[in-house]
Amino acid sequence: MQQKSNPGLKWGIVGGIILVFLNVLSYVAGPTILFSWWNSVIQLAVFIVIGVLAGKERKKQLGGYISFKEALQPVFTAFIIGTAIITVYQYILYKYIDPHLVDALKQNLLESTEKWMRRFKAPEDEIDKQLDELAKTDFNVGIAKSFMDFLKGIIFYFAVSAIISLIIRKKPAQGQHL
């Protein structure tokens, strides 16, 4: 039996390129857009679609039936590759293209944290404490931090991959053989 190619490779590259493109558009639009929560949701949605497409392509390669394990491989591969591409892009963006973007990120995070804490009527001393701790945080981007962010992303996307794989798996009917 001939080994089929892993569609996760193709879809991971496509997903990474799409995410870089969306990130460039968000960057050009300004920090308010780049750091908005809904921008993150859009990027997650793109990633999920890419994962589903990778899994469905593998399912088609296998004749319409796919186990959880067979689905997980291309879906998770797509997430690993896409995450690697966007991580490298963001490292280059924050480290070389616009090093001052780190300050904008920190400022945006301080403002949004204060806004949400006030919205939930947190005590003033708790707001001050959280903002002070956040202000002391080092937001500079380095290889080690980027790698750790990549690993955290991979852990999150493994869970997403497992959910997608559970949804797209399809066993042959009882008595039917592949």
Image (tube, rainbow, N blue to C red):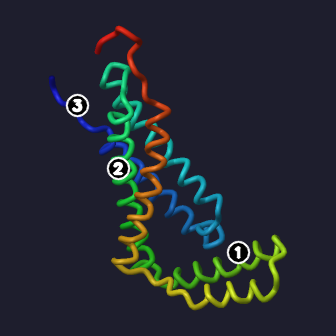
Q: Is residue 25 left or right of residue 16?
A: right
Note whether 138 is above or below 165 in the view shown.
below
How many marks are shown on the rendered structure? Answer: 3
Report helix, strand or loop for mark 3.
Answer: loop
Asked if the residue at tag 2 contacts the one at tag 3, i.e. Cβ–Cβ closer than 8 Å, the answer is no
Which residue, given by chain and number where applicable, does mark 2 sit on? 13
At mark 1, the secondary structure is helix
Residue 112: mark: 1
Three-letter amino acid code at disc 1? Ser
**Pointer 3 with pointer 1, Cβ within 8 A:** no
Q: Quadrant of the C terminus?
A: top left
Q: Quadrant of residue 53?
A: top left
* Residue 24, percent from left and from top: 49, 64
Image quarter of residue 63? top left
Q: Which amino acid, by three-letter code, is at mark 2?
A: Ile
Dot 1, crowdedness within 10 Å: few (<14), some or many (≥20)? some
Amino acid type, residue under disc 3 in the picture: Lys
Q: Residue at x 47, y 80 (%)?
A: 98
**Comes first in the chain, label 3 or label 2:** 3
Pick the quarter of the image with the N terminus: top left
Label 3 vs label 1: CA separation?
A: 47 Å
- Provide the residue designation for mark 3: 4
Give neighbour class at mark 3: few <14, some 14-19, many 20+ (Cα, 10 Å): few
Marks 3 and 2, Cα distance to the nearest angstrom? 18 Å
Is 142 or 157 nearer to us in this picture? 157
Residue 104 percent across, percent down from the top left: 59, 81
**Can you tell which of label 3 and label 2 is closer to the viewer?**
3
> Residue sitting at 40 percent across and 21 percent down?
171
Sequence-earlier tag: 1 or 2: 2
